[in-house]
Structure formats: C-alpha cells, structure tokens
Image: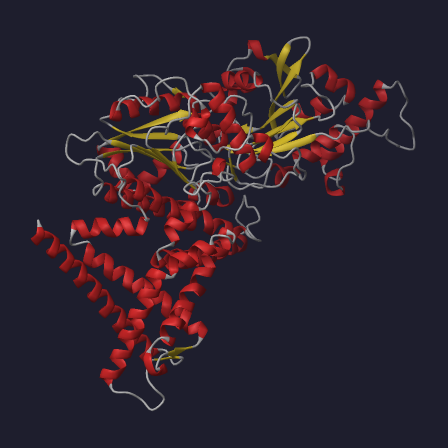
C-alpha cells in the first residue's frame, strides 16, 4: 500500500513538472512571436537565461492561478453573469502581469492587451496538457474531473462494485420536440443519442397540458403538480400579482403551492441534485435553480454553481472564449438571414446575441460541469436542464440550421457526461427528456399588423396605436365595438363619429405565452362571464372569435357553464366539448386539456389560442417568436422521453403518456426501481426540505410591468 502511495505521488509530481515544462515552452514561443511580450533584459540574454526566465514566469502564473483565482472569481460573482464571462479574460491577463513582475531582475514585460492573449493561450495549453497526461491514468483522470467540477468526496462515500444500486440522471433538453429529435437523429446531428435510441434506450413521445411551456411542465415533472398554472405568465385577481414562471418570486410561490398540494418535497428529495432548473424538486444540492435564487444559504446561493465552475481558470477562459465566439456567430447568422430575406423572421439585435451566448455556452458549461460532479460523488438522483436549443429555436426556428448546430453541440455534451459516468462510483441510468416542443410560424403581429393587445383594446373601444388602427383587423374591431356600444345605448350613429369613452378603470390586462393569450379585467374581482363581458364590451368576444389568426376562445358563461367560442359564431359548452368541432384541428386530447385548465382558479377571463394549420404546422405567436410554445397546436405539445430499456416502459402497449404530472409518476417509478422508495417516511413538512425557503409575501411583488421573458 505504501509503495502504491509513493507511485501515485511520483506520478502526480511528474505531471506537475510536465505541465510546467510545456507552459514554459509555450511562454518562450509566444515571446518569440509577439513583439510586445519579452522575457529578456534590454541587452539580451542567453537561451539558457531566457529559458529560466520563462520557467519563473510559468511557475508564478500557475501558482497564482491556483491560489488567487478562486478568491478573485468569488468576488466577481457579485457582477452580472453576462459580464462575468468577459471579465475572466482581464483577470487572467492581470495574473500574468503579476507573474511577470515577480520574475527576478525585471526581465518579463508585456502590454496589457498582449498579456490577456498570452494568459488565455497558456491556460488553454496547460489544461490540454494536464488532461492528456491524466487520461492515461484512470485514477488521475478521475481526480482531474473532481478538480474541474469542484466536487469533493462526501464523508459517506458510495461504495463501488456490481452490487451498488444505480443512480439516475435526468437530462432535460429544453424545447426539443419529438419530431425535432427524430429529424436530428435521421440527419446524423446527434450520433450519441442516435446510438442509444438504436440499442439501449426506448423513445416515447408524450403530450403536454394546454400550457406547453417549461413552467407548467417542469413544475409537474419535478413536484408532481402543475395545478393552477394556466400559462407562462398570468394575472391573479385575488392578489393583484402578475405571475411569470421564470421570475424568482413567482417560481418560489409556484413551488410552495405544488408542495402544499402534493404533500411531499418533489422528485429529488432523497440524495438529489437540481441543476439549471426553474424548481428544486426537493433537492438539497442546487445550482442555478430559480426558485432558490432568494435563498440565503452558503451552499445553495443562486450563483454557487458559477463559482464551482469558474474557480478553475482553464474553465473560465475556455467558456469566456466560447461566449464571445457564440455572440459573434449569432450576429453573423442573423445578418445572413436578413440579407437572404428569410421568412418568417424576428428581430435578433440588441442584447440578444449575448443572451443567446449565455444560454448556449455559459449555462451549458456550468450545468454540465455540475452534473459531472454529481456523478463523480455518486448522487442518487440528478435532474438538469439544458436550455440552449430552446433559446435559439425561438428566434431562428425549431427546424432551422442554427438550431440543428445547437443540437450537435448538445450531443457532444451528452457524450462527455456519459464518459464521465464511467468513472462514477456507481452505475447510472441516463434518461433524456424534454418539457415541450416548439411550433413554427410568423408572429401574429407580422401577419395582421397589430398585437393581440391592440386587437383586444380595439374590440373594447379603447384607444390603440395609429399603426393598429390602420390595419383591417384594427379598423373592423373598432367599428364593431363602436356600433355595438351605440346600439346597446339605443343611440343613433352620430355624424361626428365621436366615440363614447370607455368606463373608468376598464383597461384589460393582455398577456402572451407563445400562441396562448390571456385577457383579464382587473377591475372585476371575479372571473367574468360571457354575459358580463358582452354587456360591458359588446363586440369583444365576437371580434376575437372570428379573427382569422385566432383558433378558439375559452370563457365562462352564466347560462351554460364555460364555453368554447370559435369562428362563425360557434359555441360549445365545455362540459360537452369533444376533440371534434372547434378543436378538431388541434388533435387528440385537446378537449380534455381545455376542460382541465377551465377548472383552474386563476384561469383568465378570456383564454385565447391562436389558429393552427395542420397542413403546415403553423401557429401565430402573440409575442416576438417564430418558434413558440405555450398553447395548443402542432409540435409544441409533443415532447419526448428516451429511457433505458432495462427500466420499465413508461406506458403499457398502446397507451399514451399525457401530462407532466403523469411523467412525474413515471420518473418516480424508475427511481424506486433503481434505489428503492424515494418518498421520505411520514408526513412531509416543507421545512424539512427547504428550511430557509422565504415566504411568498417576502419576495413576491404585488404589481409588476409586463416585460418580455426569454426562457420558457
């Protein structure tokens, strides 16, 4: 045993010396190439003296990286995440300047700009050399992975061996629909996933609820309930709150409600880790989890995942470089699309290139590293969300070349995770799944010249922007509202054309979640009925239901219960609703999803679903997205589940997997098959899982402006 320790120590020393030597040679080469970088005195030095200077500089730079970098990165985590990726370059360059200053006799010097480039190259070379040397030694490679992921062995290590119960890794590919995955496998974009699907895994499509978006789906998958989540964003009359699924205040409240309804903490309460998700799933180990962003615990701070990753300078430089490259790639791709006059198309300027780079590079790298660390310490259950595809598909289209490139990079990340799993102390079952798909189409505004909010206001007889008044839809809606109001008041049409002012405080709240729209009248404390809406705004429902860009409406009726309204004055009570009639084009199960949402306490006064053309798969999003999800229609409602064959089938032969809550039950079953019962014994008390979870009153604002949100 002593001999083995000496052998390992000797091997580690050899790798340190080798990395130092390669770094020194890299510094020598850069000094010979770059005019503003020198390792000699002004009078010149011998080759031997210059080599010693390079060794001094490389050694000092490596030591500073090991000692100073983690402390500096922890301080940098106070700045916004988008800025962090750029600051790491300058931090690394500063460390090199300090290392050169420490060289005896002042022989090392570099301009600041040159120092940034030299430091980046040296970090990359040192990382590549260390990996190449370690990969030949399984133990050394495993230790390097631990360092890269900043994970240490827990005090109660998982015993290895064939008798160790397997862990389960759930990797969510956000927004990747079942058909998109099939197309990617057929085109060879995802060779790792294709090999699994052909040999070791089974592919199963499932159907989302009406609200086909991450907030509803992930809450149902992780916590077993997405009851009363009618959309990505909605207005709650009883509290006056605007709920938005990807805001921390809303996420913590949604998680609290789900826990209260189900009585347990979630899918990951037993030795679980949640990475990059909206919700925790009851996990104790968290990184980039939105619902815990307000939590004040040392281990679970919202940016703890960033520190774990960026504490290694090689990680930081590599990711920062990829961030800049991805932002440049987006600018080139969007410019090319504009020059080609691609349609449909939305604006991709402003901060979007950096938002895309953050989702496709920074978030991906941090989450992948966190997952690698979880595997290496043998956690029983890990759930991680990779959002890269969803972000790009919103702006480029779900079947675009840009989105396909993102899928290729995601496949490489999956392959890396699978490789790391081979070094884990226990075997792992890797399950791939998605939370929804995306449907493509030009936006509602680009087709009809006005937004849903404009159309609603015109139908209510309220002022609308001039551009909207000039469109056929806006003009017809305003004329219909004016005529209906005058008719209701038994007044003849005045030649002056003056309109009656709307009642005070009658401005509706109009929200969009992809191709699902929600209209609420905040001045009425209850969910308005069709009869009340017709009395106050006689033309509104008729205007919406008969608009060519709208598929159907859901509204409560005092006479018939809730009803679905469609084109041509179609009206069907929800109790009698089938998948025929006004919902026929939306496919199997549409009636049941509408019926379920109608029972939600916070369903809007008017729920609006856009049109859907089954021959082209087209929907019209009510926000600026050509790839959208959130309502009914097309691929957005058909995500996938790719599970190992040695786990039980998700559904019996001929069955269909419907709803995120049922997916939760399937994942629970698989955890039991791997590890035994996962639900803590006895009644669940939220404080046992999240003792520092703030109350919603502490973090939930009463009123907020509506702003566009990217991740849903």
Q: Position of residue 260 (x, y in %)?
A: 49, 21
Identify the image quadrant of residue 162.
Answer: top left
570 vs 577, nearest the viewer: 577
> Is 680 situated left or right of 5 in this image?
right
Above or below for 105 versus 145: below
Count of labels in the image: 0
The extreme bottom residue here reads 43
576 vs 59, nearest the viewer: 59
Tell me, yes or no, if residue 606 can be seen here: yes
> Is 417 situated left or right of 85 in this image?
left
Identify the image quadrant of residue 651.
Answer: top left
Q: Position of residue 337 (x, y in %)?
A: 51, 52
Q: Position of residue 500 (x, y in %)?
A: 86, 28
Identify the image quadrant of residue 29.
Answer: bottom left
Above or below for 553 versus 180: above
666 vs 538, nearest the viewer: 666
Q: Position of residue 669 (x, y in %)?
A: 31, 21
Residue shown at the point (22%, 48%) measured from the top left: 142
Way the structure is coloured = secondary structure
Residue shown at the point (26%, 72%) measured from the top left: 24
């Amino acid at each position: 045993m002593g001999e083995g320790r000496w052998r390992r120590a000797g091997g580690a020393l050899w790798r340190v010396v080798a990395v130092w030597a390669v770094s020194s040679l890299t510094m020598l080469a850069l000094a010979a190439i770059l005019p503003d970088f020198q390792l000699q005195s002004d009078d010149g030095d011998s080759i031997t003296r210059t080599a010693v200077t390079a060794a001094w500089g490389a050694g000092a730079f490596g030591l500073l990286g090991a000692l100073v970098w983690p402390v500096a990165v922890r301080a940098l985590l106070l700045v916004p995440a988008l800025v962090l990726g750029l600051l790491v370059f300058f931090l690394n360059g500063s460390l090199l300047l300090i290392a050169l200053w420490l060289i005896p006799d002042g022989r090392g010097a570099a301009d600041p700009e040159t120092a940034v480039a030299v430091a980046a190259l040296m970090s990359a070379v040192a990382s590549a050399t260390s990996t190449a040397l370690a990969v030949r030694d399984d133990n050394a490679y495993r230790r390097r992975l631990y360092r890269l992921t900043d994970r240490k062995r827990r005090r109660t290590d998982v015993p290895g061996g064939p008798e160790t119960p397997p862990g389960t890794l759930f990797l969510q590919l956000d927004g990747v629909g079942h058909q998109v995955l099939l197309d990617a496998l057929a085109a060879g974009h995802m060779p790792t996933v294709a090999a699994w699907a052909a040999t070791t895994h089974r592919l199963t499509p499932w159907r989302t609820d009406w609200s086909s978006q991450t907030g509803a789906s992930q809450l149902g998958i992780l916590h077993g309930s997405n009851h009363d989540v009618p959309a990505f964003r909605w207005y709650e009359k009883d509290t006056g709150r605007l709920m938005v699924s990807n805001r921390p205040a809303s996420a913590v409240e949604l998680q609290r409600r789900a826990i209260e309804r189900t009585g347990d903490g979630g899918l990951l309460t037993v030795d679980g880790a949640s990475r990059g998700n909206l919700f925790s799933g009851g996990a104790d180990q968290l990184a980039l989890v939105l619902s815990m962003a307000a939590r004040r615990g040392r281990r679970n701070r919202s940016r703890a995942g960033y520190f774990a990753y960026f504490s290694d300078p090689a990680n930081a430089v590599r990711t920062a470089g990829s961030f800049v490259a991805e932002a440049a790639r987006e600018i080139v791709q969007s410019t090319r699309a504009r020059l080609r006059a691609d349609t449909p198309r939305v604006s991709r300027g402003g901060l979007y290139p950096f938002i895309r780079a953050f989702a496709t590079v920074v978030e991906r790298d941090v989450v992948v590293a966190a997952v690698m660390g979880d595997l290496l310490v043998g956690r029983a259950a890990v759930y991680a969300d990779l959002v890269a595809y969803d972000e790009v598909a919103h702006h480029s289209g779900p079947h675009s070349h840009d989105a396909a490139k993102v899928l290729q990079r995601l496949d490489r990340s999956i392959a890396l995770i699978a490789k790391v799993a081979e070094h884990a102390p226990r075997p792992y079952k890797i399950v791939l799944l998605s939370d929804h798909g995306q449907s493509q189409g030009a936006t509602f505004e680009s087709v009809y010249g006005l937004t849903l909010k404009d159309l609603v206001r015109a139908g209510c007889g309220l002022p609308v922007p001039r551009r909207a008044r000039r469109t056929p839809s806006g003009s017809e809606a305003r004329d219909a509202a004016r005529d209906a109001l005058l008719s209701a008041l038994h007044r003849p049409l005045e030649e002056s054309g003056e309109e009656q002012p709307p009642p005070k405080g009658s401005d509706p709240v109009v929200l969009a979640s992809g191709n699902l729209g929600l209209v609420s009248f905040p001045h009425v404390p209850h969910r308005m009925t069709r009869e009340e809406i017709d009395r106050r705004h006689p033309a509104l429902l008729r205007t919406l239901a008969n608009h060519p860009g709208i598929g159907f409406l859901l509204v409560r009726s005092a006479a018939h219960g809730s009803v679905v309204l469609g084109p041509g004055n179609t009206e069907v009570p929800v109790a009698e609703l089938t998948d025929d009639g006004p919902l026929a084009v939306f496919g199997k199960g549409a009636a049941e999803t509408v019926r379920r949402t109608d029972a939600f306490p916070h369903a809007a006064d008017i729920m609006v679903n856009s049109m859907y053309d089954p021959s082209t798969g087209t929907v019209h999003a009510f926000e600026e997205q050509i790839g959208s999800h959130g309502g009914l229609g097309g691929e957005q409602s058909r995500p996938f589940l790719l599970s190992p064959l040695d786990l039980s089938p998700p559904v019996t032969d001929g069955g269909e997997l419907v709803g995120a809550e049922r997916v939760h039950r399937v994942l629970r079953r698989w955890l039991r098959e791997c590890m035994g019962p996962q639900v803590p014994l006895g009644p669940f008390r939220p404080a046992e899982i999240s003792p520092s979870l703030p109350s919603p009153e502490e973090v939930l604002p009463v009123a907020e402006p509506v702003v566009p949100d990217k991740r849903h």
